[in-house]
Amino acid sequence: DTDPLVIFTPSGKRGRVPVGTPVLEAARRLGVDLDSVCGGRGICSKCQVAPAYGSFPKHGVTVGHDALSPVNAVERRYDEKRGLKPGRRLGCQARILGDVVLDVPPESQLHRQVVRKAAEVRAVEMDPATRLLMVEVAEPDMHAPSGDLERLNTALAAQWDTPPAVASLPVLGRLQQTLRKGGWQVTVALHQGHLDATPRILDVWPGFFEGPLYGLAIDLGSTTIAAHLADLTTGEVRASAGVMNPQIRFGEDLMSRVSYAMMNPCGAVDMTTAVRSALGDLAKGIAEDAAIDPRLIVEATLVCNPVMHHLALGIDPVELGQAPFALATSDALALDAADLGLTTINPAARAYVLPLIAGHVGADAAAVALSEAPEKSDDLVLIVDVGTNAEMLLGDRTRVLACSSPTGPAFEGAQISSGQRAAPGAIERVRIDPATKEPRYRVIGCDLWSDEAGFAEAAGKVTGICGSGIIEAVAEMRMAGLVDGSGLIGSSEATGTARCIPEGRTHAFVLHDGRATSGPLIKVTQGDIRAIQLAKSALYAGARLLMDRMGVDHIDRVVLAGAFGAHISPLHAMVLGMIPDVPLDRVRSAGNAAGTGARIALCSRAARALVEANVRRIEKIETAVEPRFQEHFVAANALPHATDPFLELAK
Ligand code: FES
């Protein structure tokens, strides 16, 4: 065989091609991932390769300096105008003349891996739904009349092998002028979602447009809305932002918002309007922060719980407030982003809404599953995303189960006498000396513990206690003997500390007395302990129910997802009996796994298809109809709980 042998690294793909084949063409034939936006015109430089010369015993070839054609005029012009890195060639211009080894650098790979933080478990290949493609369009001809869009589609089909695309009105409005301005060369943003039958032209620029294009990954929570702006070429996050969900004024938690929709004729509509306008503002703000043209944001993904999902889509959530908790749809959706209120980005931008798992288990849990991949785990993992509902997944390679447990808002600091959101001034860490019963604590916004020199200034700014703070406080009170196994706070005589003060017929523990500086008196009351007991029992009972269904009596590891999971101390969670016992080093915080899942779906159509397939396979357990849930709930009320052996560490 006399055809030259070409070997691409790092993929290792190899094959023979006829002498004179352009490198880009050889890459396509051999299935090598080499990017191109300009379609081989020597403009975009996305096709760069780095040839290696010399002898390569490993590959069985010797590469001479004449293995590629000399630099031609197009390549020279690119190098003069924009500069090629030393040793690089444009793959669309360089032709293969002899055996050659060609390295494809990461920036030339279309499906390059998304840059992932070490803590994140899954690497993702870029496979965005929207790509930039440069095309050369035939000029109009009176003898063969056809519209500019038809000729653009003909050109796309011939040069990029795409099916005919549709264009929205704003794009059509700009098309004629853009084609002429570009001298019949334009770059289009072509969107081909995996759920769409027809591709769409989202935007068009005269001549060559380099991009990048951007996408927004949105995690719409009942309390906060968080968004990441990601580069759709590299997957890198360019900016992140968060705002409060303005629906809070209609109800703090999900059920109160559902009630608001039930009680008020325009309730659901008002909440829809509020959240959509917040999404629009958030997108605008994030584009400003990143100093980019909002028109370049062409994609969005949305993850949220079922109630937030329905309200964002303009669907009345009343059915979610009562059994059998029927969803309008649980399928993934592909929509115009403007339909979700994202009117401040590209007017033709598309949005992908991840599928819901069940009536109480949302797209946020689906996104967590996408990010944490329990279906690939060799050991049995429990993934808990704690909010006003705790959404849980338990599974491994063989099966994945999901349920949601009504923990209520206590873990977020609501329903707690001095409770508040995690914000500056909130006590977030608590330690109690078991001998002296004296507490020390840390406050958000201050790096010092309360017994350290210099804390006095922060002491005047203490405003309350947040979710992680109350969990630590209750667990520490239990370990210091201030609270018994049933959750009862002892008197000052019984506990030996004057901090236990009478309150009605019960007692309260004084954590922080700010009254000297006209600050608050922050106590842990009997009511607070009860609220935490209810919340933790619900969480634990949900986990036990999943274990029953799985037919196991222990799990291998626990992943705590969400902002709450990132702040909570695994030790204290286990002392309280919030989660089933596992060795402490087998408990990991995954941070905002739902947001990570949204970002993965933003970058990859394959990931979208995967999450849909996984969600179909997940076995859904409805806690409300399971008698065992009540049994576990009651049994789990004790501190830590009556069903598991008392944890070594808690002694
Ligand atoms: Fe654009 Fe080679 S494909 S420069």
Image: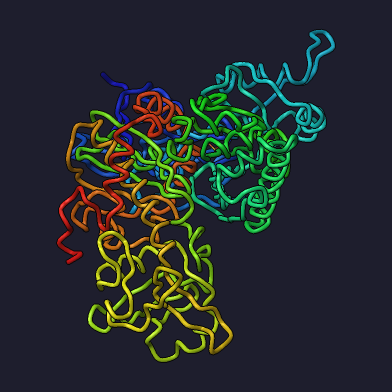
With 366 as the anchor, is 556 left or right in this view?
Answer: left
- Specify the farthest residue to the top: 143
- Residue 206 place in picture, x, y as percent: 73, 36
With 142 as the anchor, is 237 left or right in this view?
Answer: left
- Residue 629 place in picture, x, y as percent: 32, 37
- The residue lying toward the viewer, choosing from 75 and 565, is 565
Which quarter of the picture shows residue 266? top right
Q: Residue at x 55, y 54 (%)?
A: 238
Count of numbered marks: 0
- The residue lying toward the viewer, choosing from 547 and 591, is 547
Quarter of the rendering occupied by the C terminus = bottom left
Residue 217 visible in rendering: yes
Q: Is residue 499 above or below residue 552?
A: below
Which quarter of the picture shows residue 10? top left
Q: Residue at x 26, y 44 (%)?
A: 54
- Specify the farthest residue to the right: 142
Which of the colour schemes (rainbow, by chain, secondary structure, one colour) is used?
rainbow
Quarter of the rendering occupied by the N terminus = top left
Q: Residue at x 17, y 58 (%)?
A: 647
Q: Residue at x 51, y 52 (%)?
A: 237
Q: Quadrant of ligand 1?
A: top right
- The residue lying toward the viewer, choosing from 251 and 43, is 251
- The residue lying toward the viewer, choosing from 396 and 643, is 643
With 265 as the anchor, is 69 left or right in this view?
Answer: left
Q: Is residue 211 above or below residue 443?
A: above
- Residue 621 place in picture, x, y as percent: 36, 30
Residue 96 visible in rendering: no
